[in-house]
Image: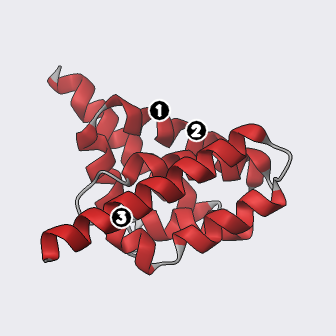
Amino acid sequence: VAAQERTAQLALRALVEAMRQHPAEVKALEYVYCAVWNLLLSSAERASEFAHALSADRGDSALALTLEALRSHARATGVALYAIAVLLALVEVPGAAARMLAAGVVGLAQDVARVHSRNERMQEGVLALVEALEAAADEDEATAV
């Protein structure tokens, strides 16, 4: 089990670095975000690691890299779909929803939904992300009172 955990951690770090090194390569980003999504689904710990991961030499957060990929490649169905899925997987990580809301993810996701208005899976993913972020914001507001 420890070896599997270590392998997953190393894979996650390599994927974050690949996001930073290849921001313009649409097909590479599609594969990277697909792999990240699968790792995030494997454990809440992986999701937390990703949400707080930094690329090695520039210090870009994985979340910031994901948002930039989504902005830059909103028309690329694979990148957009997997990036939305990754963001959705991060909503439950403490602090991640607030960071996403502050970064304007709801508006960005809605822009992506408009671009892919005929893609039912994209519409479902965006709706799920927006609803999850709104619920997280409501929960944060309720606990603040």
Looking at the image, residue 94 sits to the left or right of residue 73; the answer is left
Amino acid type, mark 2: Cys
Identify which residue is drawn at 35% across, 29% down: 42
Asked whether the residues under the numbered discs 1 and 2 touch, taking CB atoms below 8 Å apart as contact, a structural biologist would say yes
Q: Percent position (x, y) of residue 101?
A: 43, 73
Amino acid type, mark 1: Asn
| Spatial CA span between label 2 and label 3 | 21 Å
Identify which residue is drawn at 72% across, 61% down: 112
The quarter of the image holding the N terminus is: top left
Q: Is residue 105 above or below residue 36?
A: below
Comes first in the chain, label 2 or label 3: 2
Q: How many marks?
A: 3
Q: Which residue is mark 3?
A: 97
Q: Percent position (x, y) of residue 31?
A: 64, 40
- Secondary structure under tag 1 reads helix
Residue 66 lies in quadrant: bottom right
Looking at the image, residue 87 sits to the left or right of residue 107; the answer is left
Comes first in the chain, label 3 or label 1: 1
Looking at the image, residue 36 sits to the left or right of residue 22; the answer is left
Q: Which mark is residue 1?
A: none
> In front: mark 2 or mark 3?
3
| Spatial CA span between label 3 and label 1 | 20 Å
Residue 75 lies in quadrant: bottom right
Q: Percent position (x, y) of residue 140?
A: 23, 68
Residue 6 lies in quadrant: top left
Residue 57 visible at all: no
Q: Which residue is mark 1?
A: 38
Q: Which residue is mark 2?
A: 34
